[in-house]
Image (spheres, helix red, strand yellow):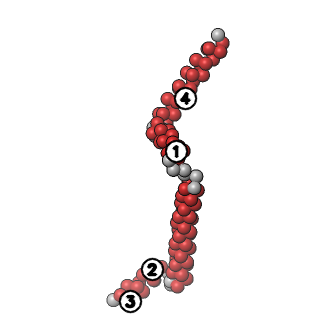
Amino acid sequence: MVRKRLKRFYGKEALEFLNQVMQDKPLLPFLIPLGLFAWAVERWLVPFSNWVPLAAAVWATIEYGRFRRRLLVEDLDKRWRQLLLNTAPTDPTRALSVAEQASD
């Protein structure tokens, strides 16, 4: 008798938990069947075991390239600002007036 009450209690808690997860993550009902479908395709049609690590490596390489490019742009921007700071006159208003005189 106690076990039956515990089963109903756990079942009720599990149902409440699933309802809460469905409210928090509405994409979950779509992702579970998608995962099962991908598993079935992988299991019976095309083994992904070689493609998944390859795709992950390509993605990581592309992300690393983007990261390095962003670092390079930041470094060049920093160097450019330092060059402008070192070559500019000490007074910014004077630099503006010199630039206006040169354009006239």
- Reading the image, the residue beneath label 1 is 44
Pointer 1 or 3: first along the chain? 1
- Reading the image, the residue beneath label 2 is 93
- Reading the image, the residue beneath label 3 is 102
Count the numbered circles shown: 4
Q: CA distance from mark 4 to mark 1?
A: 33 Å
Q: Secondary structure at mark 4?
A: helix
Q: Residue at x 40, y 85 (%)?
A: 99
Q: CA distance from mark 4 to mark 2?
A: 65 Å
- Identify which amino acid the numbered label 3 is placed on: Ala
List x then y, in percent, for residue 67. 55, 65
Q: Is residue 7 above or below residue 90?
A: above
Q: Is residue 68 above or below residue 26?
A: below
Residue most extreme to the front: 44
Residue most extreme to the top: 1
**Can I make out residue 74 in this image?**
no
Pointer 4 or 1: first along the chain? 4
List x then y, in percent, for residue 57. 57, 60
Task: Report if the CB atoms under discs 3 and 4 are less than 8 Å apart.
Answer: no
Q: Residue at x 54, y 44 (%)?
A: 43
Q: Nearer the viewer, residue 70 or 46?
A: 46
Q: Is residue 35 above or below residue 93?
A: above
List x then y, in percent, for residue 3. 65, 15
